[in-house]
Amino acid sequence: MARARFGLILAVALWLASPLGHAVIVPPLPQPSWAELTGEQKRILAPLSPEWDKMEGFRRKKWIGIAQRYSSLSADEQARMQRRMTDWAKLTPDERKHAREQYKSLLKASPEKKEAVKLKWQEYKELPESEKTRLKAEAARKPTPRPPPSKQATVPVPSSAPTPAPASTPAGQAAVR
């Protein structure tokens, strides 16, 4: 009996001493403001400067990591990175959110779907600039799809609702609906 009690006390003591027994939540370290970046980081991340101080910490951390790898890129890759940062900075918050959602959905897509998207992108890249411009203008004219109304927002119409009376028509003519 004493051994069982000793074992129980030992188990509880070990549990209390374990890191899981005293879980501590460590807040993420704040990422530097634009003013705190080095001159090199500011030069690399310049397209993002207007938005920098509004970004969440984890996004700043991601961009700082990109800036650290920047010097290891070729000149062409650096130019491409600058273009992409500039394009990203021009997007509205909603457009950025949509781009992130599309990226996440593509990560989850089947290999066949990924291959189809790659082929479509390759075809697009080979189009002449005039055709690309036309397609962009066409896409801009299309209304953005709205999500269907939620079920709570819809008001059910009773099936026994009276139907409206037909408009009066001259004698001998049928009402046209």
Image (tube, grey):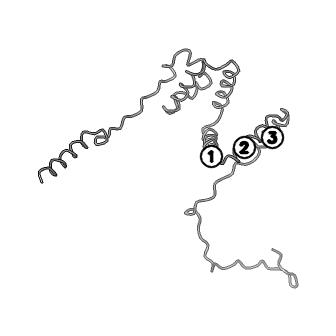
Q: Nearer the viewer, mark 3 or mark 2?
A: 2
Q: Nearer the viewer, mark 1 or mark 2?
A: 2
Residue 68: give x, y in percent of width and height: 55, 21
Q: Nearer the viewer, mark 3 or mark 1?
A: 1
- Horizontal side of residue 116 vs 130, given as left or right: left
Residue at the image position 52 percent from the left and 22 percent from the top: 34
Whichever of callouts 3 and 1 sits on the residue coming sooner in the sequence is 1
In the image as oriented, which residue stretches furthest toward the bottom?
Answer: 172
- Horizontal side of residue 36 vs 159, given as left or right: left
C-alpha gap between disc 3 and disc 1: 23 Å
Whichever of callouts 1 and 2 sits on the residue coming sooner in the sequence is 1
C-alpha gap between disc 3 and disc 2: 22 Å
In the image as oriented, which residue stretches furthest toward the top?
Answer: 39
Whichever of callouts 3 and 2 sits on the residue coming sooner in the sequence is 2
What is the quadrant of residue 23 in the picture?
A: top left
Residue 35: give x, y in percent of width and height: 50, 19
Q: Residues within 10 Å of mark 1 (few under 14, many from 20)?
A: few
Residue at the image position 22 percent from the left and 46 percent from the top: 11
59 and 3: which is toward the camera: 3
Residue at the image position 78 percent from the left and 37 percent from the top: 122
Q: Secondary structure at mark 2?
A: helix
C-alpha gap between disc 1 and disc 2: 14 Å
Q: Which residue is mark 2?
A: 115
In the image as oriented, which residue stretches furthest toward the right?
Answer: 172
Q: Which residue is mark 1?
A: 105
Q: Mark 2 is on which residue type?
A: Glu
131 and 16: which is toward the camera: 16
Q: Which residue is mark 3?
A: 135
Q: Secondary structure at mark 3?
A: helix
